Amino acid sequence: MLPTIPGAVSPLVRGLVAGRLRPAVVLAAFPSALYLALADGDAGHADVVAVVTSDALVLPTSILLATPSPHPWGVVAGDVVMLGGDVVALRGHGIRVVRSWRPRRVGTAAPSAATVDWRGLLADVGRGEGLTPRADDVLCGALLAARAVGIAGPETLPLERTTSLSASLLVAASEGYAVSCVVDHVAAAVAGSPDVERTREQVLAIGHTSGAGLVEGIDLVLHAATSPQPEGILS
């Protein structure tokens, strides 16, 4: 039996982790984060689980460890591990889920008369480099802000056009879930809080371009909310 260390799982991926044992492909392994995509015939494109250390950027779809980075994952991108039964089985050790944690969520507002034309943002899904293309980050920010001001989101998302990790974050954002500092910034921006510059800087610090993309999407929708046009503004 593999030695295991404890972790806490987000309810957004609880079903993936608690289910039957299934293969998962390592999308990327960093000192503070491991990204796994389920890889059997039943897996959806957005079925991704992040495993992160205590000092990492905690995605809403994460298993959270109590220990800081660097963590010796023992795997690299392209390797296959096993996931299920509340265990992530790596090489030489495993991670066992022993509790849960609850990701932050953007609050909902009453339905707004303002509209957004989502077609342009949806057409750009998948455009950009890296695990989360820039255009997807913009859409994530827009989805979160739309929820916060009561603007209806798109009926569907073209998840198959982007990476598995980005698809999982788009699904989370469509339901209001995001990294904690992003939720804080949406709330501050909607409220016109004096903290908005501080929260904005925290979001801008995410990744190489992800933070800037998120802020761009948030700003686009908040502009729509304050200056509604019949045809929407995002084309």
Image (cartoon, rainbow, N blue to C red):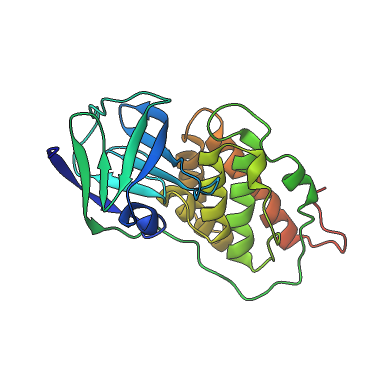
Q: Quadrant of the N terminus?
A: top left
Q: How many marks?
A: 0
Judge from the rendering whether residue 107 lies leftward or rightward of residue 51; answer left or right.
Answer: right
> Where residue 10 sits: x, y (%)?
35, 56
Residue 194 position within the rendered picture, expressed as x and y whole percent measured from the top left: 49, 54
Query: Would you say residue 86 is visible in this rendering?
Result: yes
Residue 11 in the image: x percent, y percent? 37, 60
Judge by depth and name the residue closer to the eye, 224 or 171.
171
Q: Quadrant of residue 228?
A: bottom right
Give above or below for 67 relative to 114: above
Residue 106 located left or right of residue 63: right
Residue 235, horizontal then vertical, whole percent: 83, 47
Q: Residue at x 79, y 45 (%)?
A: 120
Residue at 67 percent of width and 74 percent of height: 111
Q: Residue furthest right?
A: 231
Direction from residue 167 to residue 48 in the image, left or right: left
Residue at horizontal 14%, vertical 37%? 2
Residue drawn at point x = 18 percent, y = 29 percent: 92
Residue lying furthest bottom: 110
Asked if residue 223 lies left or right of residue 141, the reply is right
Q: Can residue 103 be seen by looking at this rendering?
A: no
The one of 141 and 75 positioned closer to us in this rendering: 75
